[in-house]
Amino acid sequence: MSSSLSSAPASPAAALTLPGGGSLRGRVRVPGDKSISHRALLFGAIAEGETVIDGLLPAEDPLSTAACLRAMGVAVSPIGAGEVVRVSGVGLDGLREPEAVLDCGNSGTTMRLMLGLLAGRAGRHFVLTGDASLRRRPMRRVAGPLSEMGAEIHGRQDGNLAPLAVQGRRLHGATIRTPVASAQVKSALLLAALTAEGPTTVIEPAHSRDHSERMLRAFGADLSVAGPAGTDVTVRPGAVLRGQPVTVPGDISSAAFWLVAGAITPGAELTVENVGLNPSRTGILEVLEAMGARIEVLERRDVAGEPVGDLRVSHGPLRPFRIGGDLIPRLVDEIPVLAVAACCAEGTSRIVDAEELRVKETDRLAVMARQLGAMGARIEEHPGGLTIEGVTPLRGAAVDSETDHRVAMSLAVAALIASGETTLGQAEAAAVSYPGFWDDLARLRA
Ligand code: S3P
């Protein structure tokens, strides 16, 4: 069965037909930042008093976090488009033992941050699971460092794979060097540190997104940041977190699809409103600018401790890029759509040091090589990245998201510049982070 672009896929089995050609024009407001949305719910839950969240992302991943919190006795008001969400905090140690398994759905952030939050709840038992994709993702990267603080976490593959059982214990502070630059790992440890005995310092190999640090401080945590580029974060326990108003900016990882679409589609002119511009997330802008993309930042402002702006993008010729090293954590979720941009840049683009993409919702290096390759891209996969030759004209084809939200939206951007029709299987995956994506696409093409 196939449905047209003007409506979201009717059922999980539906393929979406995406016509090639045409252009994009207009203004779009992307939904709330996914990382900040999870954190607002989680920190609100363990604060004293009420947290009122404006702009929370009403998508499947934050809904998973909210459902887990409700199962542990936290009142979270209904989440929907345009709704202000209220979280009634239960305090640092007020989470109740849930009667059933906590389902984290497709959300790695939910599971990993939850592990840090629950490991120190002494005397309580928790079991966490998720969908088939999440049950394949590595959790030892969190469970291992947490065990250095005294945590007890069991799971398949010696504690690496969900379902995971957490036996809450009194934790002790530690100095922990994390093996990968991952904000999920860092944030889990910072959450565990809030109620550990003694201070905890987390040292990352490179700076990952710092939304947890910013928001925990705003909630009243005793947290300090040091080291080159803010890689060493220390939490001292004892502070009480206070419920706050939180305003969630638009997600730059969702804006990225429009930025690339605007840069590669002939005649395009788009304005993406209210985009979070936290420097730990703006690698995508630096790469697009280095490619020669026409991007302007308008109305830079500060919203609740996070920099925000509107971004105007228009089509033009592009140069190839080379990305790797410390830049990777600053654009880790944007690599699939950058692979599409590379098809439109004259020359060879290279992505290196991106092994982390293999343990995202799917193995994004393999999936993008396979799916974009089916559209005629000259894309070669190697252990830590991709090499892409451009300019390569793409052709419409039968492709599939392989259940990955960012792959679904990246392929939709590729379909815009392909000759002929593309049919996209499992397009509904986009709802994990951007439920209105298909409607926005239809509107901007009109
Ligand atoms: C996230 C961190 C990143 C990112 C994910 C969200 C977060 O993962 O890919 O989409 O909210 O902390 P890693 O921490 O595994 O790099």
Image (cartoon, helix red, strand yellow):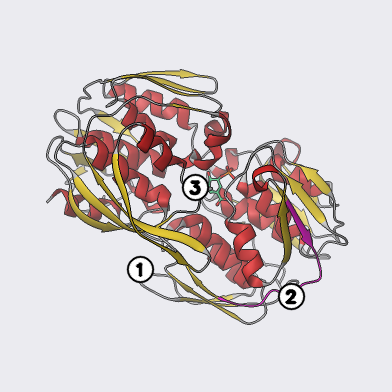
Which mark is on residue 281? 3
Reading the image, the residue beneath label 2 is 240
Quick one: label 1, few (<14), some, or many (20+) residues within 10 Å? some
Q: Tag 1: residue type?
A: Ala
Instruction: Name the quarter where the N terminus is drawn.
Output: top left
Q: Are marks 3 and 1 in contact (CB under 8 Å)?
A: no
Q: Earlier in the sequence, mark 3 or mark 1?
A: 1
Task: Please tell me which residue lies in front, 143 or 312.
Answer: 312
Whether residue 422 is situated above or below residue 272 in the rendered picture: above
In the picture, measured across the screen, residue 432 lies left or right of residue 258, that is: right
Q: Residue at x 55, y 39 (%)?
A: 329
CA gap, disc 3 and disc 1 = 24 Å
Q: SS for tag 1?
A: loop
Q: SS for tag 3?
A: loop
CA gap, disc 3 and disc 2 = 29 Å
Q: Tag 2: residue type?
A: Val
Q: Residue at x 25, y 54 (%)?
A: 271
Which stretch is magenta? 233-244
Which mark is on residue 408? none
Q: Quadrant of residue 367?
A: top left
Q: Are marks 2 and 1 in contact (CB under 8 Å)?
A: no
Reading the image, the residue beneath label 1 is 81
Magenta stretch prevailing secondary structure: loop
In the picture, measured across the screen, residue 299 lies left or right of residue 47, that is: left
